[in-house]
């Protein structure tokens, strides 16, 4: 089934029109090109990959197999924190393009902050990648509030997103307020908390009331908030299709509030000690 999200479900930031739902490709079993092509065939127009994931070659293969015009797709990739020096950063971006088999990506992100390299150097390289045409838009990932401020101070090009862990079990209110000030999108990774959210009784009850699945409710809660996008990852065709089919219903204010209250659990799924920054405290209320 072809599920085309309506055009209204793109988010605008600094001249970019980014789809609100994308297809995540981290920790994919290989080969995965067929899954990428299947996601595009069912209507996904944004694919999220990274140098670190090792999926860029198959993302490129899946895109070519899909037969969709390049201009209709949004491809995001990321440069690891080990390539934060300017020369390494630009080489990584070029390697990504070669591996993907693309002339440009729609979005290039700094995957994790690297405290050992001045932000001015890494963010400067990111802007250079954009100015050289390697990426149409640029952004960051896993940046804290202070890092976001610093990034804006030193980056000569606008940043359109901060890709972060965000779902009903993890509040991001202060980050959302900061992103709003900068006109940026919050791209939510682990949007179903790697499955943790799917057995929650509140999510289940709301899903039942709408004739939807828990994953669809978890995703709808995200994209119903202003300037929030999500990149769920799924391996089965059923899950892939289901995760895009979230544009034909709306949660009531009361349901949004009930789902927001689940944040009391404060579950952070991704927190690698070797690269995670000291995360900001986010209030529960
Ligand atoms: N920037 C970063 O540092 C960063 C970090 C982590 C992730 N990401 C990005 O975010 C993407 C998603 O995050 P994630 O993979 O960590 O977590 P996720 O999307 O929250 O969870 C994926 C898990 O949820 C299951 N699932 C997904 N849709 C489902 C559905 N409709 N029904 C039932 N189960 C469902 C999947 O099962 P099946 O596989 O069985 O379908 C898989 O086990 C990644 O692929 C990556 O692109 C970025």
Image (cartoon, rainbow, N blue to C red):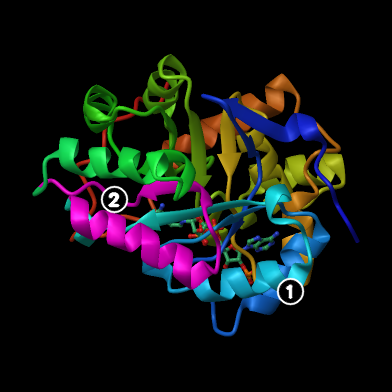
Pointer 1 residue: 65
Q: In the rendered image, which quarter contains the N terminus?
A: bottom right
In the rendered structure, the answer to whether residue 7 lies left or right of residue 85 reads right
Q: In the rendered image, which quarter contains the C terminus?
A: top left
Which numbered circle lies on residue 112?
2
175 vs 4, nearest the viewer? 4
Vertical arrangement, residue 258 with respect to residue 75, above or below:
above
- Number of dots carrying numbers: 2
In the rendered structure, the answer to whether residue 28 lies left or right of residue 17 reads left
| Residue 129 image offset from top left, x and y in percent | 36, 46
The magenta span reads 86-115
Q: Residue furthest front?
A: 132
User: What is the spatial separation of the Cα atoms under label 2 and label 1, in whole angstroms?
Assistant: 31 Å
User: Who comes first in sequence, dot 2 or dot 1?
Assistant: 1
Query: Callout 2: helix, strand or loop?
Result: loop
Vertical arrangement, residue 38 with respect to residue 181, above or below:
below
75 vs 112, nearest the viewer? 75
10 Å crowding of disc 1: few (<14), some (14-19), many (20+): some
Q: Residue at x 61, y 36 (%)?
A: 222
């Amino acid at each position: 089934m072809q599920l085309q999200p309506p055009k209204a479900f793109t988010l605008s930031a600094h001249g970019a029109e980014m789809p609100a739902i994308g297809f995540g490709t981290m920790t994919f079993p290989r080969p995965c090109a067929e899954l990428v092509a299947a996601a595009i065939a069912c209507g996904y127009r944004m694919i999220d990959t990274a140098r670190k994931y090792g999926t860029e070659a198959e993302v490129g293969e899946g895109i070519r197999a899909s037969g969709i015009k390049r201009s209709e797709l949004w491809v995001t990739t990321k440069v690891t924190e080990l390539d934060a020096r300017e020369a390494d950063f630009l080489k990584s971006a070029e390697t990504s393009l070669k591996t993907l088999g693309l002339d440009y990506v729609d979005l290039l992100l700094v995957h994790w902050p690297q405290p050992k390299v001045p932000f001015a150097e890494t963010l400067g390289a990111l802007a250079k990648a954009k100015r050289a045409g390697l990426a149409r838009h640029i952004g960051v990932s896993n940046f804290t509030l202070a890092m976001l401020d610093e990034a804006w101070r030193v980056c000569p090009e606008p940043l359109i997103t901060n890709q972060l862990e965000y779902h009903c079990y993890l509040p991001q209110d202060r980050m959302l307020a900061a992103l709003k000030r900068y006109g940026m999108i919050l791209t939510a990774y682990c949007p179903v908390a790697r499955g943790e959210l799917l057995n929650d009784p509140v999510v289940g009850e709301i899903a039942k009331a709408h004739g939807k699945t828990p994953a669809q409710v978890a995703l709808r809660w995200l994209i119903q908030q202003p300037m929030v996008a999500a990149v769920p990852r799924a391996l089965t065709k059923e899950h892939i299709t289901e995760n895009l089919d979230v544009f034909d219903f709306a949660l009531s204010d009361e349901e949004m509030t009930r789902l927001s209250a689940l944040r009391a659990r404060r579950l952070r799924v991704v927190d690698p000690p070797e690269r995670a920054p000291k995360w900001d405290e986010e209030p529960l209320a």
